[in-house]
């Protein structure tokens, strides 16, 4: 269990921060950018949840609440690099079951949606718009995680990469679902304003 008694420590005043392994790295380190962007996606998801509830037969808010908790798991996974060293504890990692759950939820939401005939623009309802924002932030997190995974000496949990990839797909499908099961989608009209 996490216990926070004091919020500021002054240990980061010199521009470094501590990873879960105890290692100190620069605050601009790619690993910090990765889990910081995951945190940003989580905050954006909190905005979406201000506008969600039980939309149709699916309780979107409960689904997004589970995902917010998973995003903290993902941040913890990224904050503790796997460099083959022995730690005094078992680090928290994203597991395949979390990826499988996202896939099942995507399929559940998508089952009642009409196929798209164009790309959708962020809009329609407040919930859909914030879900599109969460989608774009999670895609940025994925790009940073991918870059980190390709860096020398860095390992990223494959399930974590799969999770973040599926997550943006879920946010897209959920945005359509909360837009009156797709009937409220705002569609892109190519060249409309030429």
Image (cartoon, rainbow, N blue to C red):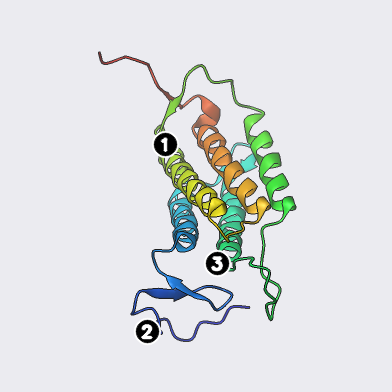
Answer whether labels 1 and 2 touch (C-beta < 8 Å).
Answer: no
Q: Where is residue 155 in the image (x, y as percent from the top left)?
A: 62, 58
- Decide: few, some or many residues near mark 1? Use Cα within 10 Å; few <14, some 14-19, many ≥20: some
Identify the residue under disc 2.
Answer: 10
Q: Is mark 2 on a helix, strand or loop?
A: loop
Q: In this rendered view, identify the residue nearer to me: 56 or 12.
A: 12
Residue plotted at (49% across, 32% down): 179
Check the image and report above or below for 152 versus 18: above
Is 169 displayed left or right of 93 in the figure?
Answer: left
Q: Which of marks 3 and 2 is nearer the N terminus?
A: 2
In this view, 5 is above or below 94: below
Residue denoted by label 3? 79
* N-terminal-most mark, 1 or 3: 3
> Any mark on residue 125, and which?
1
- Circle 3: is it few (<14), some (14-19), or many (20+) Cα within 10 Å? many
Residue count near mark 2 (Cα–Cα under 10 Å), binned few <14, some 14–19, many ≥20: few
Task: Give the structural element (helix, strand or loop) at label 3.
Answer: helix
Q: Earlier in the sequence, mark 1 or mark 2?
A: 2
The span from disc 3 to disc 2 (Cα, nearest Å) is 19 Å
- Element under label 1? loop
Which image quadrant: the C terminus? Answer: top left
Vertical side of 156 occupied by 19: above or below: below
Which residue is most to the left? Answer: 194
List x then y, in percent, for residue 149.
57, 53
């Amino acid at each position: 269990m996490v216990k926070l008694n004091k919020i500021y420590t002054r240990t980061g005043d010199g521009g470094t921060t501590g990873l879960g392994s105890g290692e100190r790295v620069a605050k601009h380190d790619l690993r910090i950018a990765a889990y910081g962007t995951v945190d940003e996606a989580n905050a954006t998801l909190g905005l979406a949840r201000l506008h969600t509830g039980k939309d149709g037969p699916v309780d979107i808010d409960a689904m997004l609440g589970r995902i917010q908790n998973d995003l903290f798991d993902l941040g913890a996974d990224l904050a503790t690099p796997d460099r083959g060293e022995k730690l005094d504890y078992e680090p928290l990692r994203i597991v395949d079951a979390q990826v499988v759950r996202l896939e099942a939820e995507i399929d559940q939401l998508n089952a009642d949606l009409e196929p798209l005939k164009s790309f959708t623009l962020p809009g329609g309802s407040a919930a859909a718009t914030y879900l599109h924002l969460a989608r774009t932030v999670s895609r940025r997190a994925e790009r940073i995680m991918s870059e980190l995974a390709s860096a020398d000496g860095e390992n990223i949990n494959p399930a974590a990469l799969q999770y973040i990839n599926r997550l943006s797909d879920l946010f897209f499908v959920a945005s359509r679902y909360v837009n009156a099961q797709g009937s409220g989608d705002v569609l892109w009209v190519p060249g409309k304003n030429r």
